[in-house]
Image (tube, grey):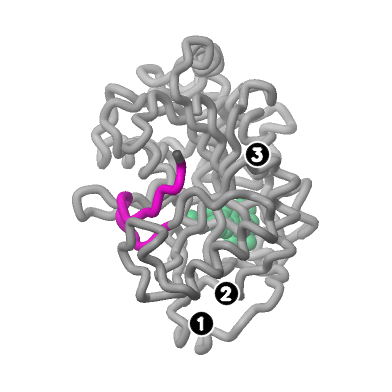
Amino acid sequence: MPCSVIVGAFWGDEGKGKIISYLALKDNLDLCVRTGSVNAAHTVWKNGQKYALHMVPAAFINEKCLLRVAAGANVHIPQFFKEVEMTHVQNRIGIDQNASIIEEKHSAQDKASAVNKGIGTTGWGVGPAVEERARRTAKLAKDMPELKPYVMDTVTEINNALDKGKKVLLEGTQGFMLSLFLSGGYPYVTSRDTGASAIASEAGVGPTRVDNVILVYKSFMTRVGAGPLPGEISKEEAQKRGWFETAAGTGRDRRSAPFDFDLARRNAKINGATQAALTKLDCMFPDCRSAQKFEDLSEDAKKFVKEVESRTGVPVVLIGTGPKALDIIDRRK
Ligand code: IMP
Ligand code: MG
């Protein structure tokens, strides 16, 4: 703090929603800016209810936090309205005037082309919407009458908030291994750079203004859609280990693999990570469920956390031990 960037370390679905919701409550965030688009779902639990958010920032859980959709983001209007209503954030959410619009036709184009290319996109149409923006024929938020009550200059607002020392969180979506430029996984990637610098860029925040880059690792790795996954295990093996998941957004099976320390190290460096979060430790070590203190972890679990730190060179400051926002070990001072 005051300006933190949250980045997914692998292929998305690391549990960024949970980490953000914890920080929103614990650190009393003033402003949270969502980047990317509707292809990503962030899961947040509030009062026993599960929210899979594609548009509204995960910090909505703190009722005092202002919520913004970044200038670089792509807005799916029906999904935006649906979530605003569901989360009751009408009075504290805004969309940058220059954010672009993802339309129904983009989804149809995506579905038709994804089959051909075999990437296995989410089908929301983000790739075609980004193409259209690059061609400079996309609609922008400021062109849409129905968005009028929400449209604003978030870039000036965010930078003014930083001037005043407010606590701002830039919410990255998806994961670094889906980066169009930097993951090395092309073409099995998404249509944007998902790294820390790009997240700041989408929000309109210069690199020198970022204080903290929190890289979110999951205790094992998962991937949906096609493309390489080093060390991949079978669905049956994943079920046996308690790692089997389905996607929050699309409902597809997630493929899984054990934590890859070399990949974790590389991604920490390229993102300039200052801190790490490690989620779902309880899926690896069920005896850690709901633990709140590092001392309460089993020896094996502690050893794993220490190995993540020694091999990535980044301190693991937040450890997820269950789905609820407060199922966390916070090792920050
Ligand atoms: P697209 O982003 O819908 O074009 O999909 C491109 C690739 O990124 C596919 O393999 C998707 O499954 C994957 N992908 C996109 N967004 C997410 C996400 O939020 N979580 C996990 N995978 C994603
Ligand atoms: Mg997700």
Q: CA distance from mark 2 to mark 1?
A: 7 Å
Give the labeled residue for mark 2: 256
Q: Position of residue 270 (x, y in %)?
A: 75, 45
Q: Identify which residue is drawn at 45% across, 84% down.
A: 239
- Please name the amino acid that badge 2 sits on: Ser
Query: Element under label 3?
Result: helix
The overriding secondary structure of the stretch rendered in magenta is loop
Q: Position of residue 149 (x, y in %)?
A: 35, 18
Is-magenta flag for residue 285?
no
Q: Identify which residue is drawn at 67% across, 54% down.
A: 178
Task: Name the image quarter holding residue 135.
Answer: top right
Label 2 vs 3, first from the N-terminus: 3
Tell me, yes or no, whether the two marked residues, 3 and 1, touch with CB atoms within 8 Å. no
Identify whether 1 is placed above or below 254.
above
Give the labeled residue for mark 1: 238
Q: Quadrant of the C terminus?
A: top left
- Please name the amino acid that badge 1 sits on: Ala
Label 3 vs 1, first from the N-terminus: 3
